[in-house]
Image: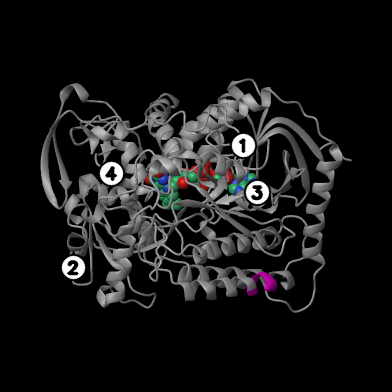
Amino acid sequence: MTASAVQFTDVLVIGGGLAGERCAIEAAAAGHDVLILSLVPPRRSHSCAAQGGMQAALGNCVMAEGDNTTLHYLDTVRGSDWGADQEVARIFVEEAPVAVRELAHFGVPWTRVRGGHNSYFIRGKRVEIDERLENDGLIMHRDFGGTAKWRACYAAAGTGHAALYAVDSEVVRLGITVRDRAEAVELIHDGGRCWGAVARCLRTGGHFAVVAKATVIATGGYGRIYGKYTTNATINEGMGAAIALNTGSVPLGNMEAVQFHPTALAPSNILITEGARGDGAYLLDKNLHRFMVDAEPEKQELASRDVVSRHMKQCMRDGNGVDTPYGPHLWLDLRHLGEQHLITKLREVFEICRDFEGLNPVTDLIPVQPTQHYSMGGVRVNKDGQAYGMNGLFAAGEASCWDMHGFNRLGGNSLAETVVAGRLVGRAVADYAAATSLDVHTSLALGTKHAAEQRAGDWLNRSGSGPDVYSIRDAMGETMMSKVGIFRTGDELTEAVDELTALLIDCDRAVLRSKVPGMNPELSFALRLKNMLRLAFVTAKGAQLRTESRGAHYRSDYPLRNDAEWLNRTLVRWAADAAEPEFGYEPVGEIDLPPGHRGYGSDERIEMYEPVEQYNSDAYERQAEHGRLASSEAPGSRILWGAWREHV
Ligand SMILES: Cc1cc2nc3c(=O)[nH]c(=O)nc-3n(C[C@H](O)[C@H](O)[C@H](O)COP(=O)(O)OP(=O)(O)OC[C@H]3O[C@@H](n4cnc5c(N)ncnc54)[C@H](O)[C@@H]3O)c2cc1C
């Protein structure tokens, strides 16, 4: 055994984005030895690309007056189409203001309230508002989709960039060890206890084991299973979720809940933030008609993302899109916001349009289309972030299914989740690590490492005329976008499942063009490909099995939300060596806010048969049967029962 073949640490954090780094800070501040693994230098993590803002009910500007955590809770649960865990949503909204203010202390240059006269665009009209002089300098808010108040705190349109740099500076200040260009490829576990992970150095191709008391998966989303049809970075391939799935013990939650963002640039799919519509931008069809005013007279362009994306897709299906060789698109009109606004509050949007499309949003319409954006599904965890079915394993951020988003995440709630969950899960991890010792046979770690090395060796040794890995990837993306997209049908989902099954078989006979064992991007990708296909498969299969429409999961053949039969969360387990995944369904948690109309989209649904009290009576027992581990506080203890009543 070489000296570096096995490393030991108290806490291993897999992922150097906002969630992973915030979690690492908490564990390190508690005195633990922490190691972060990341595919890229942490500041290049995907969090850096987040633009529009971070939700926290601070109520600092006139349009946010009267805001409070209960209104934020109501918006979040409604936004989720009642798929969220309502206790987690409550914890989140209570902690978000603290986490956002803490970021100011870390150095985030939040855009601030300007006391006195201000000019805004609200629902298509210019509105003059005097901000209170005593609020001058407080953190400003902008409007976002599906919210009752202006609540998104922002740093121009570079919120993620500002937040990640500030949090990473804390990581540096605390001296936390970061090993970048290192990829966790397998968890070290015995079926019920996780002891770290085996990682592959992306520079040398060498493997090493990191043995840890506690392990956190914070690897972000898996949008790249949609190939090029995503706003996500190329590193968002979902390997954290995949290595958890491969254990066979840890379930992934709600994989079929995939968010499509209304405004990706056409055809590149680079995101234009919802903050643009929050600041007053319009969506126009090919006749320059504001179709969202007809479709959603109340919320207009600022209904939730699932609703707006569906209207956009329908508008294009009806022949009202602008035809191009790349397919139809619609227009985003920012011109009326004026140059000063665009180069200050939406600076990054201005630059993206200029640099990637050659357009000036001050004078030009911007071509947009809805595309994959966010993964509501992920590693299913309890309210402490502790994975179901596996002691010592935690997850936070987009990689997790905590689950405050249910079937539709509200814009701005994800960045806020990363830092809220990072703080809370970090604390739980620190407590866990303090109460446990490294009582593990190194043979377990070395066996896992050996298996990972063997997999890489197998790829290099494979010869013949099999397909190449990139064509399989592209086929997966086409299948996912065309058949597991914004509108879904049973027939298309069945086709998607069959196509993905065939691609899994192809993957086993694919052949590399480059046989270099060290730094070899083709090999690195090949090692992820099967995992990506498995994630795609459970997403498609979960969508096929869920015969209702809820949030972003829209079944044209089952258009109603069905609270009688489907008020639950999908759980899927699939050991690496098992032929088929196993699906199960658990209660969403205890219900405080009873299912109802979201306030936008369709009001038609199938009501619950049983009373809420009956649903709640054994919700947590039924979750425990699905592998939920005990949390530090009793389940349900953070729900503020009925607090919402005074706001409806
Ligand atoms: C373009 C864009 C704009 C967005 N804007 C907003 C916004 O304005 N507001 C909002 O609330 N949300 C926004 N989101 C969503 C939000 O940015 C993300 O959900 C959030 O930043 C995810 O943070 P994270 O820490 O969970 O993961 P990430 O930031 O994606 O970090 C994942 C980390 O894991 C590492 N990693 C991955 N796999 C491995 C592995 N196998 N081994 C080791 N390391 C690994 C990566 O290197 C990276 O460091 C946006 C998303 C996109 C795509």
- Mark 2 — residue? 288
Q: Quadrant of the C terminus?
A: top left
Give the vertical position of 265 relative to 41 (above or below). below
Residue 98 at x, y = what percent?
A: 40, 26
Tag 2: amino acid: Leu
Foreground: disc 4 or disc 2 = 4
Foreground: disc 1 or disc 3 = 1
Gap in angstroms between the C-alphas marked 4 and 2 = 26 Å
- Contact flag, marks 4 and 1 (Cβ < 8 Å): no
- Counting residues from the start of the chain, the first of labels 3 and 4 encountered is 4
Cβ of mark 1 under 8 A from ligand 1: no
- Counting residues from the start of the chain, the first of labels 1 and 3 encountered is 3
Gap in angstroms between the C-alphas marked 1 and 2 = 53 Å
Q: Residue at x 27, y 77 (%)?
A: 319
Determine whether the residue tagged by mark 2 lies in a helix, strand or loop.
Answer: loop
Asked if the stretch drawn in magenta spans residue 26, the answer is no
Gap in angstroms between the C-alphas marked 3 and 4 = 33 Å
Q: Residue at x 17, y 28 (%)?
A: 115
Gap in angstroms between the C-alphas marked 3 and 2 = 47 Å
- Mark 3 — residue? 244
Tag 1: amino acid: Leu
Gap in angstroms between the C-alphas marked 4 and 1 = 33 Å
